[in-house]
Image (cartoon, coloured by chain):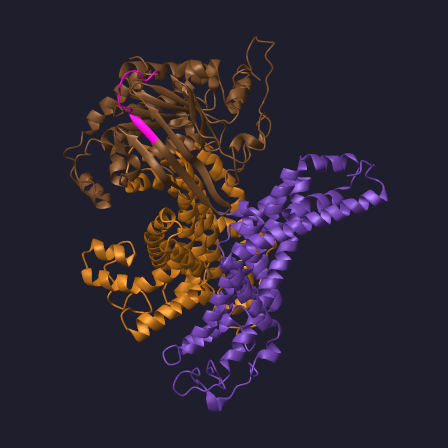
Amino acid sequence: MATATPTTPVDGRAARRRAWARTREQLADFWRRFSKNRLAVVGGVVLLLVIIMGLFAPWIAPHDPTLPNFRNRFAPPAWMEGGSWEHPLGTDQLGRDMLSRIIWGARASLKVGAVVISFATVVGIFMGLVSGYYGGWVDVVIQRLSDILLAFPYLVLAIALMGVMGPGFGNLILALVYKEWVTPSRIVRGEVLAAKNVEYVEAARAVGARDRHIMWREILPNTFSSVIVVATLRVAWVILMEASLSFLGLGVQPPEPAWGSMIAQGREYIFSSWWLATFPGIAILLTVLGINLLGEGLRDALDPRLRE
Amino acid sequence: MLPDTERTINAEPILDVRNLRTHFFTDRGVVKAVDGVSFQLYPGETVGVVGESGCGKSMTAASIMRLVSHPGRIVGGEILFMGEDLVRKSEREMRRLRGNQLAMIFQDPLTTLNPVLKVGRQITESIRVHAGDDREDGGFFGWLRRLLDPSGRISRKEAWDRAVDLLRQVGIPAPDERMRAYPHEMSGGMRQRVMIAIALACNPVLLLADEPTTALDVTIQAQILELMQDIKEKRGTSILLITHDFGVVSEFCDRVIVMYAGKIVEQAPLDELLDNPRHPYTQGLLASIPRLGDKSHKVRPIKGIVPELHDLPPGCSFSTRCPLADEYCGRVEPELEEIAPGHLVACHKVDATAAGAKGA
Amino acid sequence: MNIAQVITRLLQLIPVIIGVTFIVFSLMYLTPGDPVEVMFGGEGAVSEEDLARIRRELGLDRPFFEQYLRFLGGLLRGDLGMSLVQRQPVARLIAGRLPATIELTAAAILVSLVIAIPAGVISAVRRYSTIDKLGTLGTLLGVSMPDFWLGLVFILLFGITWKVLPISGRMPFGMEPEHVTGLFVVDAVLTRDWVALKTALRHLALPAITLGTSMAALTMRVTRSSMLEVVQQDYITFARAKGLSGTQVVLGHALKNALIPTVTVVTLNIGILLGGNMIVESVFAWPGLGRLVVDSIYNRDYTVVQAAVLIYAITYVTMNFLADVLYTVLNPRVRF
């Protein structure tokens, strides 16, 4: 190790190289722990399949999910009497192909889950940074606002909002995001408060680094693993909530296929055609289960402190 | 009751541990926490077990109580307690011994007493649990039966009175009041007295004391040691005292066992060990104690750290830190050999250590 | 926790509740569409002059803050406004629905505790066993399952395929027990109407299990993890060193400690039940508050939605407060 001053360019490169090596080592360590958790890997694979289904729905789905065929309504799944491999999971009350609708439904669920959580995480990180770093009345206002939003039980305000604002993608996102940002913001805020007095931040401030630089470069990276874990687990929750809203007719609107609304429609015919309501439910269950398994695996591998 | 340090009296040992091995089966390999430990404890005797943390001294005590928890297991050896092998006893038989003839106290009374139960309940419980021992003890249903039919047990009132009496004996003022307190409402010294009272509830033959004074202030330490001395003299209880503190040992013990990395490296009567320590590790431990008022004495901590127990060197475990170790030490494990009456050492260099007895 | 601390904590709730009322009020104030038009069955049913007159009479032409203060004043008097569609005081409508919801929620909590606490304890005590692995998988399934779908699967299995349990409503018309509390199960017991009791319990079974499942999963998870932490504590080893049996140690020493976090989490999770309420009541046609809200949304009966959301939120805030109080009551170490 050279004893040269840290300002020489050679040494700066070496430091970067060392930092990169350390990052790589951490990643390898993370992967070792994560890949040992078989259930988490299974969860990841399931989620990956669902993502592929959602992304490539137009190419994967065997039929147009919205095209009715009144000559072939309520066709049972292929393995039942009267079923055919033309429609492996049967057809619905309008003769639409169930498999294609489920594949397209993945798109709706993932879209809502991804947009809500990205939006919530960005807002949450910003609010947490501001709240923790500046403190004072800014902190008080943000924290009271969080308290008030947290006072609404899950789904209650979302249902009311959707009912009042009417359906629509933007409204749906808003109805689900309104308090999702609170969890990441509290994580970031806690980290900021903890880091505020730590030496390296004080050192950075002493050498005249600006607030923004300190927040982005010194504090934020420490919160990544917690924020990622929480975001992953929350995606599962958001997908469940979206499905619930769609089930009540307040979420994704027909004819766009969504698992929740498919179940709601299938409910009408549950006495005669059980598959209409059953298969979309299994799709939700597997997706959410996959995300939960993945999220818990990530949590255990990234941040054992987060364990309950 | 004089200690039988010279083993001249032909008394049967109360505890005879033979080649005890307790291993932990972890992801990173097998940890031999206790690896071939043998020693005896005679009636009325107090033996100290010393060593750094992780040397297996606490696990030795846990093994005697048969309270080793997953992933640990006693994999070999015998623990003869009053002539009977504890290793071969069923869990039910062990339960009758624990807290009865065989009692144990732990390091930190704050974490050892249940925080949500009042002190009185915790003492009376240990009195009552052994009162119905002669009756059939059939797991959950046995427990239920005894719960529904309390005959053969002592009454709550009786247990309460005995508990109050015990608290008085361990020197707790206003014991009646103290019975109704929660552990966190008492001082550290008081809590330790409560724990001792619980251990004494059924008048044990053998008391295992795992660092009983470590968590306490120095003045309180002295009081607790005095109390234990008192118990020893009045009741004739044999005590196995586990500690890392040579000060406590020199005040309190008849005989000393030094452990390192799961093995006994030296064992001797107290005076012999203090005057003539022969294992380099023992010498190192003694040299690392700061002495008040002795300016000429230089504190010399032992170099290096305790090796990882799942990755021990092939020969003498201490060879990686030993100032005298040579290639042979790193290859061949030394046996415990008697070099003087009652003085056992496991070291290839035992001849070289004699001269430098007071710090080579 | 002494009285002063409870009062301090209660006072801290006031700004939160005021914030909640403000949000709920603004939500409805900003609603697109005219409540008066909703009242009279849509656009064009009443002349413009009449609409303006009714608006004036209802105070809807007043500025925002004046309307909000009137709304708050009404709340304090227990006046939740008039239903736009049903032409009844909202308070009366809600009061009529509350017993059904309370009965269902209580049953769901009971079901979840009865399953979750023993399961969590056994799972923790028999860690790494098959039972533990099955239990952990079960909790994951429980939290990943959409409750409306689970309800439909139950309907399909128990109601349609096996025909063993009723799948909708609380009670066939005319079979209700004499009114005492409005909770059919309680009323049936009080009036010794065993037929009604059996019918009430049979109707309650599927909705309560559906609603209780996710809560059971969460409760079991907490019980297991806090139990795992507790059994590693020194006082558990010491209890065993006293000669207590495994059962005595678990029931007498570990459980009380392990239940402290469990009680808190259960109380907090009642919020999830309140949301799940609306879904499950809709699935099983359970005539409670949740179904009232959903129906009112379809009918655009916004005053009812507004009042119900407010009641849900205040219940939830109260539960959070209770969780804090319970935590300190159960845990003699905490003095906050």
Q: Position of residue A118 (x, y in %)?
A: 63, 59
What hue does chain B carry in this figure?
brown
Q: Is residue B10 magenta?
A: yes
* Residue B62 shown left or right of residue C21 in the figure: left
Nearer to us in this view, C29 or B229: B229
Nearer to us in this view, A120 or C307: A120
Nearer to us in this view, A40 or B66: B66
Q: Position of residue C1 (x, y in %)?
A: 42, 33
Q: Position of residue B358 (x, y in %)?
A: 54, 14
Magenta segment's dominant SS is: loop
Chain that appears purple: A
Q: Residue at x 72, y 35 (%)?
A: A202
Chain that appears orange: C
Read off the magenta span: B6-17
Q: Could you tell me if residue C1 is visible in this image?
A: no
Q: Could you tell me if residue B355 is visible in this image?
A: yes
Q: Is residue B175 magenta?
A: no
Residue B21: name its quadrant. Answer: top left
Q: Position of residue B291 (x, y in %)?
A: 55, 13
Residue B89: name its quadrant. Answer: top left
Q: Residue at x 71, y 49 (%)?
A: A21
- Above or below, B320 against C31 in this view is above
- Above or below, A7 against B40 in this view is below
Q: Quadrant of the C terminus of chain B?
A: top right
